[in-house]
Image: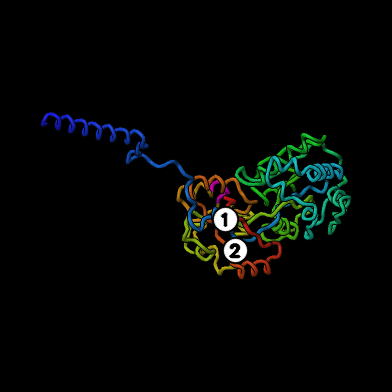
Amino acid sequence: MKKLLSVLLAVTMMATVLAGCGAKKDEPAAPAASQPAASQPAASAPGSAEEVDTNTVAVGAIVLARDDIAEDEIYTFVSTIFENLDAITSQHAKGAELSLEYASSMTSVPYHPGAAKYFKEKGFEVASVKEGAGTGAARGSLTFGTGGESGTYYAFGGVLGAYVSNNTNLSITTVTSGGSAVNIDDMTADNVQLAFCQSDVMSYAYNGERLFDAPIEGFSVVAALYMEAVQIVTNNPDIKTVADLAGKKVSVGAAGSGTYFNAIDALEIYGLSENDISPVYQSFGDSTESLKDGKIDAAFVVAGAPTTSIVDLATATDVYLVSFDQEHADSLLAASPYYSNYVIPAGTY
């Protein structure tokens, strides 16, 4: 009897062990405590440019030409761009923002006859045409002054120049530059024959204001292309308004640049001056590198959004764009009518 009970007990224990082994075989292995969960995209920081719209102001990005450039060559340049916007947009997203209505809308400076001729053919009369312009001999090759390598002028200008060169008999050489004011000087010296320029700087030059001691003659409008946003960039979430820049180290753009005067305008509307911040005078690329390295607290970048240098910054750190409240934006527009309201959508960076 005892022998029989011993056998039954042994069988029961064996069955229990086998059942336990079978259950563990079917269960998935638990991850080791130190093994991280499957990789997920990093969450965007609350209030970052990835999450919220930014209310700001903008100026226009304008292409100018020397008055002595032949009418036919400017006509070729403008018509090739606006007749092929789909192809240009496939190479740079800014192409989608171009329109004949905006291109022909400038009123503060007259248009080059070659541009005015094309817009009229498309049903858009410009406000004025530069008398005596467009009568120079054809050159066959034009140099196009753009901006710094980290800005939209250079990237988009390169696309426009290459497209015209590859599809017409007019050769366009795109070159980097110090931006709007430098481009005006380079056009005057005939170092470049086409140039990008902010609409406000264009007005300063034509009227002999701010950057310019006397009116600059010899240039006219080719086309207004797109809006350039005044972007106040920081990686400090505590900087929420322009007023918060007081006492901070801020890049206000290269000395004497259009961005510099945009920064001064923005500060003044909020009751601040250059003396209320610690100003640094840097290009877009240098400004975003300084933000990345913690050398400055914020930077003014005036360019089409998205801007290459800010996109690069956003890959390394959370990016915050400082908004204008509507009351102060309206005050700025009233004081300086070449500004417009503008919204940078969430997710641009």
Query: What amino acid is found at the position of numbered circle 2 in the picture?
Result: Ala
- 120 or 87: nearer the eye? 87
Residue 325 found in image quarter: bottom right
Q: Main secondary structure of the magenta part?
A: helix
313 left or right, relative to 103? left
- Residue 323's place in the image compared with 40, above or below, is below
Identified by mark 1, the residue type is Phe
Residue 337's quadrant in the figure? Answer: bottom right
The image position of residue 93, as x and y in percent, is 68, 45
The residue located at (35%, 36%) in the rendering is: 29
**Residue occupied by mark 1:** 300
Dot 1 lies on which element?
strand
Q: Residue at x 73, y 37 (%)?
A: 162
Asked if the residue at tag 1 contacts the one at tag 2, i.e. Cβ–Cβ closer than 8 Å, the answer is yes
Stretch in magenta: 282-286
Q: Is residue 11 above or below residue 208?
A: above
Q: Give whichever of 19, 313 is nearer the camera.
A: 19
The residue identified by callout 2 is 266
N-terminal of the pair, mark 2 or mark 1, is: 2
- Direction front: furthest residue: 1
> Where residue 300 appears, x then y in whole percent?
57, 55
Is any part of residue 12 visible from this angle?
A: yes
Residue 198: x and y in percent read: 69, 54
The residue carrying pointer 2 sits among few (fewer than 14), some (14 to 19) or many (20 or more) residues within 10 Å by Cα, namely many
Q: How many marks on residues? A: 2
Residue 184 visible here: no
Give the label on residue 292, or none. Answer: none
Mark 2, secondary structure of its residue: helix
The percent coordinates of residue 143 (x first, y second) are 74, 40
Real-space Cα distance between discs 2 and 1?
10 Å
